[in-house]
Image (tube, helix red, strand yellow):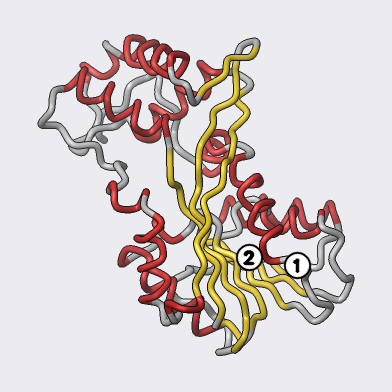
C-alpha cells in the first residue's frame, strides 16, 4: 500500500462538497437567471448533479409543477446525497447513476440540459460528454455548461507545492490553463455539435463561504496537494508547514475576506449557453 500522511483526509464526495461549498449553487443561480422562465413542459437534465444543488436552485425559482427533472452523476455517494435531498424536499426528479459520456437517454429527450462544473472532469477533455448533451437535447433546446474562470486557491496550492518540493515534481490534479478561458469552454461545446452562432458566453462572480479555514485547507491539500508520484514521508513531516503556508497565502489574497475562523473566497466562472 502506498504511503499516505497520517494528517491527510481520504477523498470522498462529501469532502469534495466542503471544498466547493456553495460556489456551485451561486453559479447555478446565475445561469438560471439567464435561462428563465422554464415552460410547463420543461424536461430538464441535471447532468453531473452532485448533491442536487442545481435541482435545488431550479425548484427555488418556483417553476411550473409539471416540469420533469432527470438528475445523473457517476459518483454513487453523490447519487445517494441527491436522492436524500430530493426525497426530503419532494422534488419532481429521478436520480440515476450514469456517466456523462454515455447517457442512457433517447435522442432529443430534453428541453434543457444543465452541466454545472462537469465537462473538465469527463473523458476526452469534455468532448464526449458535450456530444451526449447535444444528442439528448431537443431541437430548440437549451444547454448550459460551466467551468471556472478563476480559482485562486488552486493557484496557491501550485505555488506552495513547487516551493516545498521543487519545480520538477508535477501535481496530478493541476488544471491546464486553457480551461480558464471562455473560448476553450466554447470550443468544447462546439465540438459537441452546437453551432457557433447559437452559443453565448458569460462570466460571473461566485463565492465559497468557508466556516473553518484550517479544516478547509487541510481537505484541499489532501485532495490536490499529492504529487504525481504519490505522497512521500517528507510530506508528512512538512504537512503543517504546507497547511500554514496555504492559509497565509489565502489570507493575503485579495480574493479572500477573513471572517471569524473562516471567511469568503471569491472566484469567477464561465457560463456557456447553447441552443440546438
Image position of 184 (left or right of 218): left
Picture coordinates of residue 268, whole percent (x, y): 50, 42
Residue tagged by mark 1? 93
Q: Secondary structure at mark 1?
A: strand
Front residue of this view, candidates 197 and 176: 197
Image position of 4 (left or right of 182): left
Picture coordinates of residue 259, whole percent (x, y): 63, 14
Q: Residue furthest left?
A: 168
Front residue of this view, candidates 4 and 136: 136
- The nearer-to-camera label among 2 and 1 is 2
Point out which mark residue 28 bears. Answer: none
Q: Residue at x 65, y 66 (%)?
A: 71
Tell me which numbered mark, 2 or 1, is placed earlier along the sequence: 2
Judge whether 269 appears above or below 138 on screen.
above
Q: Residue at x 41, y 56 (%)?
A: 182
Front residue of this view, candidates 180 and 47: 180
Residue tagged by mark 2? 46
Judge whether 200 appears above or below 218 on screen.
below
Q: Quadrant of the N terminus?
A: top left
**Label 2 with label 1: CB-CB less than 8 Å:** yes
Image position of 11 (left or right of 183): right
Picture coordinates of residue 112, whole percent (x, y): 65, 74
Can you tell which quarter of the image residue 257 is in?
Answer: top right
Picture coordinates of residue 199, whole percent (x, y): 49, 72
Amino acid at each position: 500500500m502506498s504511503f499516505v500522511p497520517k494528517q491527510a483526509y481520504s477523498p470522498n464526495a462529501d469532502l469534495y462538497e466542503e471544498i466547493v461549498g456553495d460556489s456551485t449553487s451561486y453559479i447555478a443561480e446565475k445561469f438560471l437567471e439567464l435561462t428563465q422562465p422554464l415552460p410547463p413542459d420543461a424536461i430538464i437534465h441535471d447532468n453531473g448533479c452532485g448533491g442536487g444543488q442545481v435541482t435545488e436552485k431550479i425548484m427555488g425559482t418556483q417553476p411550473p409543477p409539471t416540469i420533469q427533472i432527470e438528475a445523473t452523476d457517476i459518483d454513487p455517494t453523490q447519487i445517494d446525497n441527491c436522492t436524500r435531498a430530493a426525497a426530503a424536499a419532494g422534488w419532481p426528479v429521478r436520480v440515476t447513476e450514469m456517466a456523462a459520456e454515455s447517457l442512457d437517454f433517447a435522442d432529443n429527450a430534453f428541453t434543457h440540459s444543465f452541466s454545472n462544473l462537469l465537462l473538465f472532469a469527463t473523458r476526452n477533455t469534455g468532448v464526449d460528454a458535450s456530444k451526449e448533451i447535444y444528442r439528448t437535447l431537443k431541437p430548440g433546446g437549451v444547454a448550459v455548461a460551466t467551468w471556472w474562470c478563476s480559482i485562486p486557491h488552486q493557484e496557491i496550492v501550485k505555488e506552495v507545492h513547487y516551493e516545498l518540493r521543487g519545480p520538477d515534481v508535477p501535481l496530478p490534479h493541476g488544471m491546464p490553463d486553457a480551461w480558464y478561458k471562455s473560448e476553450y469552454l466554447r470550443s468544447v461545446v462546439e465540438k459537441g455539435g452546437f453551432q457557433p452562432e447559437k452559443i453565448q458566453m458569460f462570466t460571473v462572480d461566485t463565492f465559497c463561504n468557508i466556516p473553518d479555514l484550517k479544516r478547509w485547507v487541510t481537505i484541499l491539500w489532501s485532495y490536490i496537494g499529492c504529487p504525481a508520484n504519490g505522497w512521500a514521508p517528507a510530506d508528512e513531516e512538512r504537512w503543517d508547514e504546507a497547511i500554514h503556508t496555504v492559509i497565509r497565502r489565502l489570507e493575503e489574497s485579495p480574493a479572500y475576506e477573513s471572517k471569524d475562523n473562516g471567511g469568503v473566497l471569491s472566484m469567477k466562472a464561465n457560463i456557456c449557453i447553447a441552443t440546438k
